[in-house]
Image: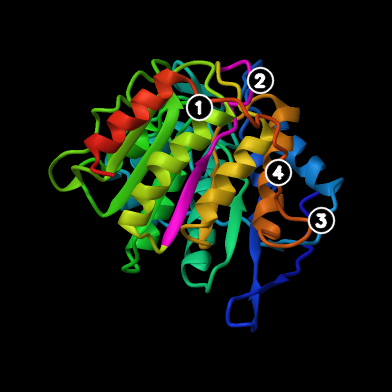
Amino acid sequence: MFTDKSSCFFVPVSSGKIQTMKTYLSSGEVFLGHKLVGEHPERPERLQAIEAAIEGSDLLGKFRRIPPRPATTEELLRVHSAAYLADLRQRMGDLQPKGQGWLDPDTYYGPGTYQAALHAAGTACDLALRIANSDGDNGFALVRPPGHHASADRAMGFCLLNNVAVAAAAVRATGRRVSIVDFDVHHGNGTEDIFARDGGVQVISLHQFPFYPGSGAATSIGEGNGRGAILNIPLPEASAGPEYKLAMRKVVIPALRRFDPDVILVSAGFDGHAQDSLAGMSLLEDDYAAMVASLLTVQTRLLLVLEGGYQPSALSASVLAVLRVLTDPSGPSGYRPSGHDAGVAPSDAVRKLLAELQKLHGL
Ligand SMILES: [Zn+2]
């Protein structure tokens, strides 16, 4: 696994000339080192299932593989406090790993955790910067531990460093505009907290509500300079493709077009899948593909960063469906909606919620 096969493909552009476009993919053994002796849903088998699915698919060889790299201190300090980073180093040991423990009731660490976390944030940065500097490349950072519950100074909900926030801050440091779209089933409270008073990074989260971690109400829209740059779409339990697609069309896409990002980063969690028992949503892999395809209509410079997704076969099928969109968005093997939910109307509750959000955000 983790072979370094790479290639690119050709996308005809409207001018008639042929443009080379790449899909970056990064994963690696370093991310398997984060593990617990005992049962935990956030385990190395998640990534192994994804890699096995890619190896067994016709997509093998369609990626530009990038080896993982650690985040630099400068990159981390744009998002996390020096005191928190020192605390992580002291507790886990950066040079001499210190065994196993817990940072919060859900968040374990083991001997390989510090390096995995450092590489998860660094790899997200690396891919985001390559994409930001490209004419329209995209990518997927297949990393763990996940990041979107981690705030500037706190580990939480399986997350130590906020990978997508560190990547967003790296891109913004180059003077570019960045939007984060978070479709993990849980609210990305850490990401919101980091950028809530900022305004320079747009953060849009679709999540089950009310649910862990409890935040993410529609009325949470950012403060001060950040007012309006935070957009929460709290969806009721059992929401499925029709509800998410309507949310994309009515709120997410118009909000993105108004912010006009140079790069879109996606907190790509797949725990809203119908087969995932950690939450109560009813998405299928095709719905994730549809969401990513619609994001690409706003901005082709798009990077997905793995967050949750705890049922290995549903997770790997969903990642594969998304990779199919990324590698060939307009080609014959590209994404075609299966129409599995054709004719199913979104619920009235979600229609009402989206109308309220449109009003609240002036969309
Ligand atoms: Zn989640």
Tell me what residue is drawn at x 79 percent, y 56 percent: 3
Q: Quadrant of residue 272?
A: top right
- Which is nearer the N-term, disc 1 or disc 2? 2
Q: Measured along the vertical axis of the image, is residue 324 above or below residue 41?
A: below
Question: Is ligand 1 less than 8 Å from the beta carbon at label 2?
Answer: no
Report the mark closest to the observer, 1 or 3: 1
- Which is nearer the N-term, disc 2 or disc 3? 2
Q: Position of residue 88 (x, y in %)?
A: 41, 36
Disc 4 to disc 3, C-alpha distance: 13 Å
- Which is nearer the N-term, disc 1 or disc 3? 3
Report the magenta residues as a range. Answer: 263-279
Name the amino acid type tagged 2. Val
Disc 2 to disc 3, C-alpha distance: 32 Å
Res. 336 visible in picture = yes
Using a 10 Å C-alpha cutoff, classify the residue at mark 2 as few (fewer than 14 neighbours), some (14 to 19) or many (20 or more). few
Are dots 4 and 3 in contact, CB under 8 Å? no
Query: Seen in the image, is 114 located left or right of residue 81?
Result: right
Report the mark closest to the observer, 4 or 2: 4
Q: Which residue is mark 1?
A: 185
Disc 4 to disc 2, C-alpha distance: 32 Å
Query: Seen in the image, is 336 located left or right of residue 267?
Result: right
Name the amino acid type tagged 1. Val
Which mark is on residue 321? 4
Tell me what residue is drawn at x 46 percent, y 51 percent: 265
